[in-house]
Amino acid sequence: MNRAERLFRLVELLRGRRLAVTASTLSQQLDVSPRTIYRDIAALIASGAPIDGEAGVGYRLDPAYHMPPLMFDAEEVQAIIAGLRLTRAFTDDDLAHAAGRAEEKLRAALDDEGLRRADRSPYDAPIYDFSLARRDLHLKIRRACEEVRKIRITYRDEKGEETTRVIHPFLLLRWQSVWTLIAWCELRTADRHFRLDRITKAEVLVDRFPEPRPDFREEMRRQLAAHDHNYR
């Protein structure tokens, strides 16, 4: 889980405890080090959370404390709903279901006017337009990106010729109405862009690869913004 999720979970673990909870116990429940718990507790206290205690003794949260709800303005709600609907329509089944749940949670937190705005959102995407095979391919590639694992693909170029390659998947982009995978190609020993609709087979391998440099995503965005890409 990311840091924001961990802080929220940490408050939930402390809430309602009559006795202090040690950093060691919290670290085991959140699968992080006690040092991380100390830093997170300090961050929560700095943000105003009424936590009593100290390292080596334990921590306790004031039972009356509630985390403030995350608030979005009208335009932010519209942006989130549009993104969730596109995610539901054009990614894998796991993310599609997660997007549906997220929209339900968002709608549950809106007032009447917010719901009316949400219902008037002009953005939607037909879920039936994305086949099960393409959803499965998206899931394989997303998992490989998250787990930093190589993929063996069979790829068909614009002439219809197929090659088998081992690639290091980095980034999925929705580009010119198609999904494109940016990856390092071991066959070409260079970064390459692969259209997902031209990948006929994909197998996630056990082998891992080095993570891309921190500025990789931003560099790819700049390149795509500056040049019209011809898919290879």
Image (spheres, rainbow, N blue to C red):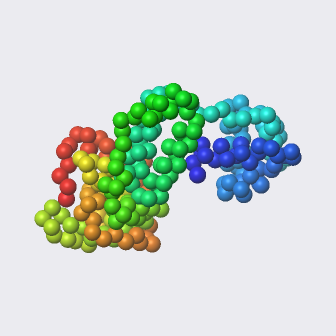
Q: Residue furthest right?
A: 19
Residue 47 in the figure: left or right of residue 158: right
Q: Residue furthest left?
A: 159
Residue occupying image coordinates x 42% and y 61% = 139
Vertical arrangement, residue 171 with respect to residue 8, above or below: below
* Total marks placed: 0
Vertical arrangement, residue 206 with respect to residue 54, above or below: below
Image coords of residue 23 (percent x, y): 77, 50
Residue 42 in the figure: left or right of residue 53: left
Residue occupying image coordinates x 41% and y 72% = 205
Residue 82 in the figure: left or right of residue 103: left
Image coords of residue 28 (percent x, y): 72, 57
Image coords of residue 1 (percent x, y): 58, 52
* Quadrant into which the C terminus falls: bottom left
Residue 159 in sight:
yes
Residue 219 in sight:
no
Image coords of residue 52 (percent x, y): 82, 37
Foreground residue among 28 and 197: 197
Residue occupying image coordinates x 31% and y 49% = 174
Residue 33 in the figure: left or right of residue 208: right
Foreground residue among 207 and 122: 122
Residue occupying image coordinates x 71% and y 56% = 29
Vertical arrangement, residue 40 with respect to residue 149, above or below: above
